[in-house]
């Protein structure tokens, strides 16, 4: 299950998220299990403070699992603190931390700038500056693809109007039955931008969706776990996912999604009450 990006690169639709997973030994142990389970896409970010440990772990683990750098797709993200003219230096720093030759996908983590009110138009200029610097990063071989995260419809339209020669490959957003934006998905599909979901299970430490009676009903009907139902719901809409886990059991379960949810159950999951968020300028 892969998606062809604008560059022609193939990106696995199921990736492994590393948010809140940090520490040299923990990263190594978790990635060892993830590679064994079959994950070949790893998602990080400058603000996760784990890039360097991921780089060190992969140097040791890829040979162990008979893999090369080319077998792995690595994503990381620009910190909101570096939004704007500092984006190129931030990309260089992430690549140095990961020490992996090149980054497969580099994302603007947030449409706003750290310390600037979300309603201020300064954010618009900073986003544009970041994208220009990231385009330069592609041309100089630091990253093969560039994209965005937490962009809404207005942000995407703004970017594709002035993309400085490279379209965004991907938009990573919160996406689960309690929060999804159909207009955003339609726009991304129209523009050939892959939508990637985070918080597929409803968010860290939020068990509301996993305990939802409708999710449980569908999971029992199909003989799958509630987590598998929530992940498959996104995947079945051709949305990429980056579930995170620390146990081998959950890692294996989260990647074992080769089944279909019947259309009536997909509709039921898509009809849950929505929770809105505000992303500002």
Image: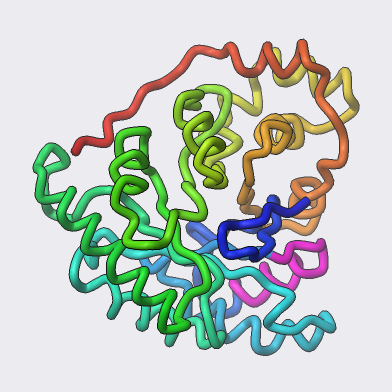
Quick check: 115 above or below 261? below
Residue 87 visible within the image? yes
Instruction: Reply above or below: 274 against 133.
Output: above
Residue 69: image location, x then y, percent = 68, 82
Q: Quadrant of residue 63?
A: bottom right
Is residue 38 shown in magenta?
Answer: yes
- Which residue sits at x=18%, y=70%? 85
**Is residue 119 depicted above or below 33 in this figure?**
above
**Foreground residue, 76 or 130?**
130
Report the colour scheme: rainbow
The answer to whether residue 119 is above or below residue 79 is above
Left or right side of 57 for 255 = right
Count of numbered labels shown in the rendering: 0
Decide if residue 179 is in sight here.
Answer: no
Q: Quadrant of residue 153?
A: top left
Pinpoint residue 174: horizontal percent, then vertical percent. Answer: 47, 38
Q: Is residue 91 magenta?
A: no
Tell me residue 21's x, y (percent): 53, 63
Part of the protein shown in magenta: 27-40
Q: Quadrant of the C terminus?
A: top left
Q: Position of residue 15 (x, y in %)?
A: 66, 56
Tell me what residue is drawn at x 67 percent, y 32 percent. 237
**Which of the pair 263/30 is nearer the observer?**
263
Q: Quadrant of residue 238?
A: top right
Task: Give 225 or 182, whichever is nearer the viewer.
Answer: 182
The rendered magenta stretch, by its main secondary structure, is classed as helix
Residue drawn at (24%, 55%) of the image: 127
């Amino acid at each position: 299950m892969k998606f062809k990006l604008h560059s022609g690169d193939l990106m696995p639709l199921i990736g492994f998220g590393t948010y809140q997973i940090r520490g040299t030994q923990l990263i190594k142990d978790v990635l060892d299990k993830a590679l064994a389970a079959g994950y070949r896409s790893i998602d990080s970010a400058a603000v996760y403070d784990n890039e360097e440990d991921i780089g060190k772990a992969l140097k040791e683990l890829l040979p162990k699992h008979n893999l090369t750098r080319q077998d792995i797709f690595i994503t990381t993200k620009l910190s909101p603190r570096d939004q704007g003219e500092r984006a190129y230096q931030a990309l260089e720093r992430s690549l140095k931390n990961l020490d992996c030759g090149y980054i497969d996908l580099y994302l603007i983590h947030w449409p706003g700038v750290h310390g600037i009110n979300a309603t201020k138009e300064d954010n618009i200029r900073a986003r544009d500056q970041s994208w220009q610097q990231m385009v330069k990063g592609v041309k100089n071989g630091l990253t093969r693809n560039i994209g965005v995260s937490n962009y809404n419809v207005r942000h995407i339209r703004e970017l594709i109007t002035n993309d400085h020669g490279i379209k965004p490959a991907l938009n990573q957003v919160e996406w689960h039955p309690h929060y999804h934006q159909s207009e955003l998905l339609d726009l991304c599909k129209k523009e050939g931008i892959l939508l990637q979901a985070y918080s597929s299970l409803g968010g860290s430490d939020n068990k509301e969706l996993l305990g939802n009676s409708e999710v449980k009903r569908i999971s029992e009907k199909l003989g799958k776990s509630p987590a598998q139902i929530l992940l498959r719901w996104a995947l079945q809409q051709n949305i990429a996912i980056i579930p995170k886990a620390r146990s081998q059991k959950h890692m294996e379960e989260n990647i074992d999604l080769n089944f279909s949810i019947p259309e009536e159950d997909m509709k039921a999951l898509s009809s849950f009450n929505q929770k809105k968020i505000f992303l500002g300028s």
